[in-house]
Image (tube, rainbow, N blue to C red):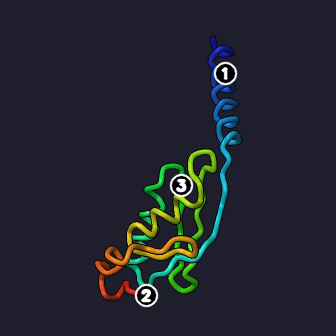
Amino acid sequence: MRTRIMNLFVGFFLLGTLTLFGQDTKNEKFKVYGNCGMCETRIEKAAMNVDGVTSADWNKETKMIEVSFNAEKVKPEDIHKAIAKVGHDTEKVKADDEVYGSLPGCCKYR
């Protein structure tokens, strides 16, 4: 019985390991325009809401975001579009003027 439980445990461990290595995880950095802590929260939340994104970290000094994502689920363009949709220009996608206009004054970078 003990051997059976141990074999089951090892099997689950190997299955979990294969699942992790089977994912095509990518990291990318790109410019996103913004100014303050509210921008940081909005930008990171927009990126994290894209299915397949596992982490997002925007630096307000450098205006660069670093994202990790499952390349089998999401394309980098989808992340750019999601961020632009909440009012922040990226190096590839410009935010809609109306959405940008609704940002708080401290968040306006244009």
- Quadrant in which residue 54 is drawn: bottom right
Q: Spatial distance from mark 1 to mark 3, Cα to Cα?
A: 34 Å
Q: Tags 1 and 3 in contact by the CB under 8 Å rule?
A: no
Sooner in the amino-acid sequence: mark 2 or mark 3 = 3
Q: Spatial distance from mark 1 to mark 2, Cα to Cα?
A: 58 Å
Residue 33: x %, y % from top left: 49, 81
Residue 71: x %, y % from top left: 63, 50
Residue name at image x 45 percent, y 82 percent: 34
Residue 6: assigned label: 1
**Circle 1 Cα neighbour tier, 10 Å, few/some/many (<14 / 14–19 / ≥20):** few
Residue name at image x 61 percent, y 50 percent: 70
Left or right: where 9 falls relative to 46:
right
Residue 3: x %, y % from top left: 69, 15
Q: Spatial distance from mark 2 to mark 3, Cα to Cα?
A: 26 Å
Callout 1, which amino acid?
Met
- Quadrant in which residue 23 is drawn: top right
- Quadrant in which residue 107 is drawn: bottom left
Residue under label 2, please give it.
109
Using the image, determine if residue 18 lies above or below residue 75.
above
Residue name at image x 38 percent, y 69 percent: 86
Residue 15: x %, y % from top left: 66, 30
Callout 2, which amino acid?
Tyr
Of residues 74 and 8, which is closer to you in this image? 74
Callout 3, which amino acid?
Val
Using the image, determine if residue 56 lies above or below residue 4.
below
Q: Mark 2 or 3, which is nearer the eye?
A: 2
Secondary structure, mark 3, is: strand
Left or right: where 19 falls relative to 59:
right
Sooner in the amino-acid sequence: mark 1 or mark 3 = 1
Residue 53: assigned label: 3
